[in-house]
Amino acid sequence: MKLEGDRKVRIVEVGPRDGLQNEKTILATPVKLEFIRNLIGAGCVEIEATSFVSRTWTPQLADADELWKLLPEPGIYSALVPNEKGLERALNVGVKRIALFTAASESFVMRNINRTIQQSLDEFAKVVSMFRDAGGKFVRGYVSTVIECPFAGKISPLEVSVVSQLLLDLGADEICLGETVGVAVPDEIRKLTEVVLKVVPVQKLTYHFHDTRGTAIANVAAALEFGIRSFDSSAAGLGGCPYAPGAGGNVATEDLVYFLERSGYDTGIDLAKLAKASLPILTALNLPVASKAQRAILAENQTC
């Protein structure tokens, strides 16, 4: 049965960047490339591959320049860029899609990048201008702590909408709302979405959920009610936030794909192949299979 356009869901796989940036083990570039090739083979089209951040502060992604030059075809790749210096590195290796990071919480931005929200946006204005002048194609604006900040407490939907609007004004092509510490329940996501959709067109809005308390899939379901058809996820649920104490991993791509496909949505991802895609990474990091859908699928295929 052919699904209608609104039954197609875009998934941005963030495992190679957000999934690995907080791990203590530093993986070799070929191991990361194998992971990315496996994801491509499973049908993951859009992948946030790395970040051009300080090699000192984030040694797990210190090989960003080398990795980017080796990324396999086909694939739509993006990279996180924190500032002008990071952008220069990204442009030198041909990056055409970038992500910028701020938050709806002043405390969080200050602890993360040692700037106020406005200072981060002033920096981003320069970055976006340089990027466009160099032929850059796509800019994502991350807004973290959209429900609650680990340092400042609850965040109002209005605060999130204001920062989202400012990012659009700077030239962001889409806004990604990050539920950084994984505390939200569906009613909070509904209230937030109602407010943010007043300033951000639905086709430009993406959600990035963490599954700290097991509510990520329920929150995806709430966002779907509003026509949101774009979500971030990380294979095997890898990753968290190094600046958010207690924050669990990202929602697992396996769990997200299972939920969406079972609910009649089309992700274009082969779940059986996806379940195996992260196994070499989990082995390298000495981590167990944590995604429930991944465990079930592997057991069905007698591979674990």
Image (cartoon, rainbow, N blue to C red):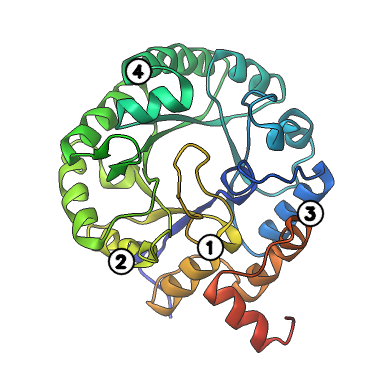
Residue 172 picture quarter:
top left
Q: CA distance from mark 2 to mark 4?
A: 33 Å
Q: CA distance from mark 3 to mark 2?
A: 32 Å
Residue 34 disc label: 3
Q: Amino acid at mark 1?
A: Thr
**Res 253 label:** 1
Image quarter where the N terminus lies is: bottom left
Secondary structure beneath label 4: loop
Amino acid type shown at disc 2: Ala
Residue named by callout 4:
116
Between discs 2 and 4, the one toward the N terminus: 4
- Element class at badge 3: helix
User: Residue 24 location in percent, x, y?
Assistant: 69, 44
Residue 221 image label = 2
Asked if the residues shown at circle 2 and circle 4 are in contact, with their CB atoms under 8 angstroms apart, the answer is no
Residue type at the position of mark 4: Thr
- Residues 118 and 222: in front is 118
Q: CA distance from mark 1 to mark 3?
A: 17 Å
Residue 203 coordinates in the image, percent (x, y): 32, 46
The answer to which of marks 3 and 2 sits earlier in the sequence is: 3
**Placement of 21 over or under 252, stated as above or below:** above
**First reached walking from the N terminus: tag 1 or tag 3:** 3
> Depth check: 151 or 20 in front?
151
Residue at figure coordinates x 73%, y 47% from the top left: 73
